[in-house]
Amino acid sequence: MASKTPVGFIGLGNMGSHMAKNLLKHGYPVFASDIFPESCKEIQDLGAQVLDSPAEVADRADRIITMLPSSPNVIEVYTGLKGILKKVKKGSLLIDSSTIDPSVSKEMAKEAEKMGAVFMDAPVSGGVGAARSGKLTFMVGGVEEEFTAVQELLTCMGTNVVYCGEVGTGQAAKICNNMLLAISMIGTAETMNLGIRLGLDPKLLSKILNMSSGRCWSSDTYNPVPGVMEGVPSANNYQGGFGTTLMAKDLGLAQDTATNTKTAIPLGSVSHQIYRVMCARGYAQKDFSSVFQFLREEENQ
Amino acid sequence: MASKTPVGFIGLGNMGSHMAKNLLKHGYPVFASDIFPESCKEIQDLGAQVLDSPAEVADRADRIITMLPSSPNVIEVYTGLKGILKKVKKGSLLIDSSTIDPSVSKEMAKEAEKMGAVFMDAPVSGGVGAARSGKLTFMVGGVEEEFTAVQELLTCMGTNVVYCGEVGTGQAAKICNNMLLAISMIGTAETMNLGIRLGLDPKLLSKILNMSSGRCWSSDTYNPVPGVMEGVPSANNYQGGFGTTLMAKDLGLAQDTATNTKTAIPLGSVSHQIYRVMCARGYAQKDFSSVFQFLREEENQ
Amino acid sequence: MASKTPVGFIGLGNMGSHMAKNLLKHGYPVFASDIFPESCKEIQDLGAQVLDSPAEVADRADRIITMLPSSPNVIEVYTGLKGILKKVKKGSLLIDSSTIDPSVSKEMAKEAEKMGAVFMDAPVSGGVGAARSGKLTFMVGGVEEEFTAVQELLTCMGTNVVYCGEVGTGQAAKICNNMLLAISMIGTAETMNLGIRLGLDPKLLSKILNMSSGRCWSSDTYNPVPGVMEGVPSANNYQGGFGTTLMAKDLGLAQDTATNTKTAIPLGSVSHQIYRVMCARGYAQKDFSSVFQFLREEENQ
Amino acid sequence: MASKTPVGFIGLGNMGSHMAKNLLKHGYPVFASDIFPESCKEIQDLGAQVLDSPAEVADRADRIITMLPSSPNVIEVYTGLKGILKKVKKGSLLIDSSTIDPSVSKEMAKEAEKMGAVFMDAPVSGGVGAARSGKLTFMVGGVEEEFTAVQELLTCMGTNVVYCGEVGTGQAAKICNNMLLAISMIGTAETMNLGIRLGLDPKLLSKILNMSSGRCWSSDTYNPVPGVMEGVPSANNYQGGFGTTLMAKDLGLAQDTATNTKTAIPLGSVSHQIYRVMCARGYAQKDFSSVFQFLREEENQ
């Protein structure tokens, strides 16, 4: 184990800290850095070495994983004054697991290439629980020759590592999945609500949908109606899960890429607007399945 | 076999003629009637007795199945001058398999009750193929005591017969399923289109969706993108399948019931409008998965 | 004055009571009836004679105006057991100022014709203030020969009486106007909100819109942003004006007629859904310009 | 006249060439440059001096106007290797009349400031006709002290020059106006279509709307229904006017700024998607009022 080469990790937030711990558990020495140094304490106690800047991480490790909130953070961490690319070594492998605009991933890949390094995008699906238990899914974009090396690291943190194509396609796959998820979640919520208003029992209706052509993940695995399923956010007052603001962010990325590529996404656009209004009306911190509650008119109103 | 009591069948269209044939195959004597008498020829050759009007059918059979295009036809066939209720016998069982507004089903049930008869709604899913092979799904609404009797007849024509609740809930379940189907089909079409524009291979993208939270029937069983699956309308220039006009009709019913019950259906409404515009722009006769083609902008435009 | 022939008035609600008072002011004897007799007290004190049912009104007056909340009320008042048509005299003129589905207006006209009477639809725009001051606008549909007689009565209550065409077109004009109003109000609200977020002063922005191609009644006469105009509901916490539930009702009628005529109304449908959700989220009693408040995300959320 | 100081003009397209001619007419010596040198021929014949690059223009003139298709072109013309800022003189006034993302305007202003120059955004409304006749409207953002100097130049090319606030607000005003324009145009088109289906004469319906609360520029000045008005694109098979692709571009900018500022624009988003689909379905080059034609279902389909 001791012979494993060290891995850099930048961005020790809710997701990143669990991911870095899983790297440590698999025996990788970790050099960590975060704009908020206190985020690194826990992992430092577990043996990671904390450094002051992305540049310093790049100086010490030639495989680096980044996990950051949004495009501007990624640009800063890679190309900023103390960014990775200031000290990156030739031949380094840079893996970005942030969910960002694929055109930014492409830009970063070009900049990395100028320095002789390889940049791959590898956004995740699965949330904090999957990050903790090492059961994330990674969608990977970038040069295919590096995929084996990427896979070696990412399997420490996830169970599925899918190669999607050239750089940016990992982001594309993530964004596409989440857009379809938002659409089918809102669709399930309004369908269940309509059925209930028409006199159907919600459990029976979801059973019928799930054996018919209306079946989807939001109806059979993550039903938004309280009382239909256990162990999902709708059974727990929409706490936990995947927050409405995060969904609104991902739909914003979907909208940006659609506008840039002149692609019509009628339901994706409307879904984006619905989650945006929900953020404005007090649902920002609830799970995104709370759209059922948002749309529902109480009988006595 | 000879001892089976006869069954009336009104509405021998694309669906009804296959359904009536399956009743004959199961040994039921059939009394048939259709506003276009020539529709009855085939079934007449197979042994059915053709009568002039719904009233005459009601005079000869105390179990009657109706399969009609829309609400006004149902109203006419039940309450018109030569309608079923003019000659219905006390204790008769009237099963309507049309897809119509559930409030009309409720009205018909009231009118039938006045005559001492029982009306149940039992719309189908599955299309002409399933009608022919006797593999329809029936969603049944009405008094629960009659469900066994209904089931006996409907299992001659279908493999699933689901009890949904009071009268009208069969329609409600059908409408709800088809609304969610329309939403997830359009969602799948625009998601696949966006992914392709962003550089993803369509087969790979659908594989990723199907193992993730974007999974739905439209992505894993009836994918709208040519080349992704075989044996679906998208593999056959969107011929066959479930026509865009039929989907527009069902979404119109969903919209009507939602407006009447003051229920918000944001994506259902937009989906209704999209299928309505498609009807206006030449897609009326294509399968409803042709929305992929409708939304797609060719690169060289 | 004494020689004027009496007029029947059915439906003495918020609008109808003011309209009937204006008839009295112009010297017309009034026979009034309402399902809630206490609604008639004020007008009784002013000299109107109150009767028990629409049928009795029809027995005493051969010109009758009805002002009712919705289609089922109109059907009951005209064709119910104690309805107008039970005792209507040949040659009577029946004017319905309710806002209802134009297909119901057509039905009522047919039923009236069977009794030798003429039914015209004449919905109003202008609200309670205009009803009080006799400044309503009437949109009239029905046989053109009767328009002069209709105009004579309606000019007692309104300043504009517009002939729209055959029966039902008065409703059509009303519904169309209110649909476009809803669309441009929501459009103005989201545009003003976007401009403010981008750093524009709201008064300046509305000035620019009003001299440009974005100009509309909602921007130049009834601006939804507090502080831009005086004397409008947005200057008074969205009290008074035209309530969100009423707008949702009119949009429901627009949707019904569009569905029946297979007409695509993409923005009308979305506007309907937005006002429907607003009713569910506590905006039911506020003026419909409160959509500005509904969409707005506060900076600190 | 001869004593007037020269003005630089970069971007001699459909709009820019007319604008530059109007500067010449007002006696300003013009230094022109365009990435396609042949675009400059006409203005060269009229006395303008043509230069090879924006940098050279900046070397010769200290007041420069730019009129370019989109954000990337503006970035290139200002900050590229041969861009204006490479040779700009201290105290220069740079006026950008392109319609672009306001955040790009802000960036350009910052870069200009570093070089001691002032950048103002001044997008136009009015189209090619207004550019030719010098009747454009300019919406100006930037430091207020420079507004008088800006106004002096822009009044040679337009009749309205409106100060909107800090840099970027000119763009904001333009984008907001065009978003509301798109919404009310689609709204007018679907409303007129619905009214016609319900039996109303289109001229009468537009007259009613224009005297009521549905009134807007799209109904009273630029009606989309053939036969209602003369001298508008709908009277000329939707040729001329403001193309659907241009409207789609402006709605894309509105969507981008809304997403960036977390602003809900439900009808703006749907309008964007409708114009996007129209581009995909053959309406790209038609005037944006052709949405009436796009939505319309012919009776015999």
Image (spheres, coloured by chain):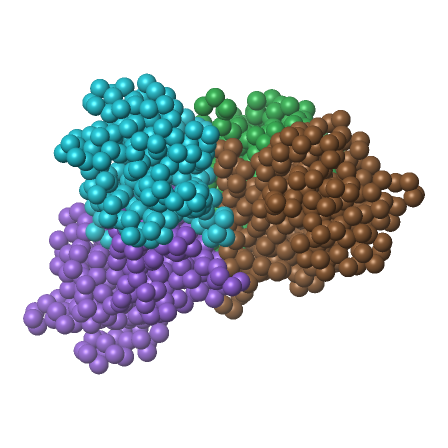
Chain colours: A purple, B cyan, C brown, D green
The answer to whether one can see residue C138 in this image is yes
Residue B96 at x, y percent in the picture: 34, 39
C274 over C254 or under it: above or below: below
Asked whether the viewer can see residue C211, the reply is no
Please state which of residues B103 and A171 is positioned toward the viewer in this rendering: B103
Q: Nearer the viewer, residue B258 or C77?
A: C77
Does residue A188 appear left or right of residue B79 in this picture?
left
Quadrant of the rendered image containing residue B158: top left
> Observer-nearest residue: C60 or B122?
C60
* Above or below D237: residue D242: below
Q: Position of residue A60 (x, y in %)?
A: 21, 68
Residue at x-position 26% and y-position 34%: B7
User: Measured from the top left, where is residue D13 in percent x and y?
Assistant: 55, 31
Quarter location, residue C59: top right
Image label count: 0
- Tell me: D297 left or right of C46: left
Q: Residue at x 91, y 40 (%)?
A: C3
Report the residue at 92% width, 44% height from top: C2
Residue D242, position in %: x, y? 57, 32
* The C terminus of chain B: image quadrant: top left
Image position of A239 with respect to C1: above or below: below
- Is B19 in front, or is D32? B19
Is the residue C124 above or below the residue C89 in the image?
Answer: below
Residue at point 76%, 26% (across, down):
C145
Residue C235 picture quarter: bottom right
Quadrant the N terminus of chain B occupies? top left
